[in-house]
Image (cartoon, rainbow, N blue to C red):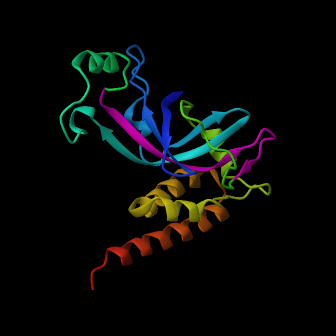
Amino acid sequence: MKIAVIIGSNSHIDYVARVVEPDRDTGLPTPDDHGFGRFVSVVSGDERFVGVIYDSRLFNPEFSGFGPRLDPKPALDDFDARGKGRSGILIGIIVLGRLLSDGGADHAVPARTIPVGRDVAVLDADSVRRFHTDDAGRANISYFSRIMSHSGQLAVPLMETIVAKISPGFDDDAKERLNVLLNSLKWQRTMTEARF
């Protein structure tokens, strides 16, 4: 299900997308579909990129200007009619890797960029599991350092959300290893927030 459209990027792996307006009949997408920690996919050519929503911002063009409007009123009306001047929600997406056509997953930084205008869709549960499973069937989050370095203050809560989402799909051994990581992150957050 399409939830947003890529409108720009902050870096090679950090993309900005604009959430689409909810459909009048179905009400989709819902706020949960573009919430914090939601896994998403973007198809570009023959590649299926996997990302996670790590940030959101409200956009209101009426309050984003710093001075008087320079365009005549008719030009502004035309801009609004195309839907580009309306308020909305922007989401930040970190690209975690790709789902491969052979059924595997690659957590490396993709060589290609995602062009503007590509649709962002919710990643289904089976694809989330496949993306987080290595060739031996173990849990895999090789993108961990990328999340920690590119998500700023939201890195620890984001990793906590990711671990909580992927843990139920794995065996007890994998859950235990993921739990160790989760406890380490909680300790790190506690020490960061502590004031001495």
Q: Quarter-wise, where is residue 156 in the image?
A: bottom left
Q: Position of residue 110 (x, y in %)?
A: 68, 50
Q: Going 19% across and 39% down the picture, which residue do you hit?
A: 67
Q: Position of residue 42 (x, y in %)?
A: 60, 36
Does the magenta-highlighted stretch encompass residue 53?
Answer: no
Q: Quarter-wise, where is residue 78 in the image?
A: top left
Q: Is residue 188 above or below residue 138?
A: below
Q: Going 42% across and 62% down the picture, which residue do you hit?
A: 152
Q: Is residue 157 left or right of residue 116?
A: left
Quadrant in the picture for the N terminus? top right
Q: Is residue 50 above or below residue 19?
A: below
Quadrant in the picture for the C terminus? bottom left
Q: Position of residue 151 (x, y in %)?
A: 46, 59
Q: Nearer the viewer, residue 172 or 23?
A: 23
Write down the region rendered in magenta: 86-106
Q: Is residue 102 left or right of residue 170?
A: right
Q: Quarter-wise, where is residue 112 in the image?
A: top right
